[in-house]
Image (cartoon, rainbow, N blue to C red):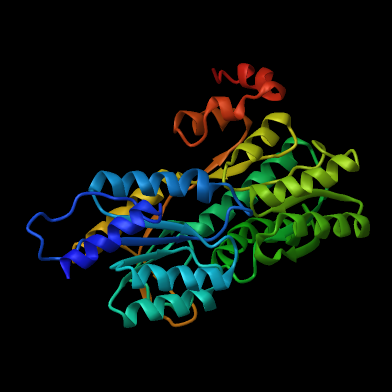
Amino acid sequence: MRRGLATLTAALVAAGSIAACGGDDAGDAPVPKIGVILPDSATSDRWETADRKFLESAFTSAGIPFDIQNAQGDKNAFATIADQQITNGATVLMIVNLDSGTGKAVLDKAKSQGVATIDYDRLTLGGSAEYYVSFDNVAVGKLQGEGLRRCLTELKATKPVIAELHGSPTDNNATLFKEGYQSVLTPLYASGVAVKGPEQAVPDWDNTQAGKLFEQMLTQSPNIRGVLAANDGMGNAVIQVLKRNKLNGKVPVTGQDADVQGLQNILAGDQCMTVYKAIKEEANAAAKLAISLAKGEHQEVTGKVTDPESGREVPSVLLTPKAIFRQDVKSVIVDGYVTRNELCTDAFAAACQELGIY
């Protein structure tokens, strides 16, 4: 049995499927392995440039074999990857679901096979994960709403019409973001300080679709003067439409993820703000729980999130997000999330110098 597992592990390492690390020289117990499924690389750079990197580092440091794969937005691929990881001996499965239905099916199958599970970043509604690790996503949305209000105030906007581009309707995080920013915007609408404009959820966080939807919004409501975009990718799609209409920099746009493109849009004055989520902290917290489960241990966590579908209280680790305006961009560099070389390309060198980003 031991020889068969070693052969399988060696084959997978040779194929580049999992990362190799030391096992138990005594040789009786199988080496625990952790499978991770990331959602895509199109809607946000973070999954490949940050989450993968930090998870790999944490697992490698702990000496735990792991397999990190990306479903690239394909639900069938997501299920197939999970099947392969379970078949190949994963004892822990960490997923970022594409939607709750697909995620639940994977979690339930893993549970039936005795595989421990973690929801990473996105809660799977009706799911069975032992832990949920993410950020306080209502707080993320609240920071976006407060950021847009601040930028509109600085522009001395009078009763601005605000358009809202929500995240994917199948992503529970998008629901929480919306709850957060609407807690800020709804009172503005009710008091007449701002005017509620068109709103639309963007299927699958698709940036191309976001651009098309916003173009339609702007055609129907050319007096839009503020845009609550739920992440940086969709915010950039909005900015491209505003540029074509010579409105960039005049209509504040929010974002989230603090990716390079979003930060550059902030440096250029085309994006009002973003929300930085310290992915290294999130990845390390999730890796710590996964490593513990792989060793047959269950850590106590202080947080709980109630699954709105099942009513189950899910043990949770929720981290604190941070609003990033132009003067805060340097802090994202200092934290190591993006590098100066990535951010301060020729077009943005002067802005970086102005902000002391060397």
Q: Which residue is situated farthest in the left direction here? A: 26
Answer with the quarter of the image where residue 110 lies: bottom left
Q: In what quadrant of the picture does the C terminus appear?
A: top right
Q: Indicate the position of residue 245 as horizontal and vertical percent values.
A: 91, 43
Quadrant of the snapshot with the N terminus: bottom left
Q: Which residue is more in the foreground, 164 or 111?
A: 111
Position of residue 16 measured from the top left corner of the image (x, y, whole percent): 40, 52
Q: Is residue 217 visible?
A: yes
Total numbered labels placed on residues in the image? 0
Which residue is at 60% across, 50% downward? 44
Q: Nearer the viewer, residue 216 or 45?
A: 45
Q: Position of residue 38 (x, y in %)?
A: 49, 59
Residue drawn at 41 percent across, 75 percent down:
107
Query: At 79% from the left edge and 54% from the top edge, which residue is drawn?
Result: 211
Residue sitting nearer the eye, 102 or 120: 102
Q: Is residue 229 left or right of residue 107?
A: right
Residue 124 seen in this snapshot:
no
Counting from the top left corner in percent of width and height, residue 346 is at 69, 21
Compared across the picture, whether 88 is left or right of 148 comes to left
Q: Which residue lies at the image location 58% right of the left edge and 67% below the top edge?
A: 171
Answer with left or right where residue 266 lies relative to residue 47. Answer: right
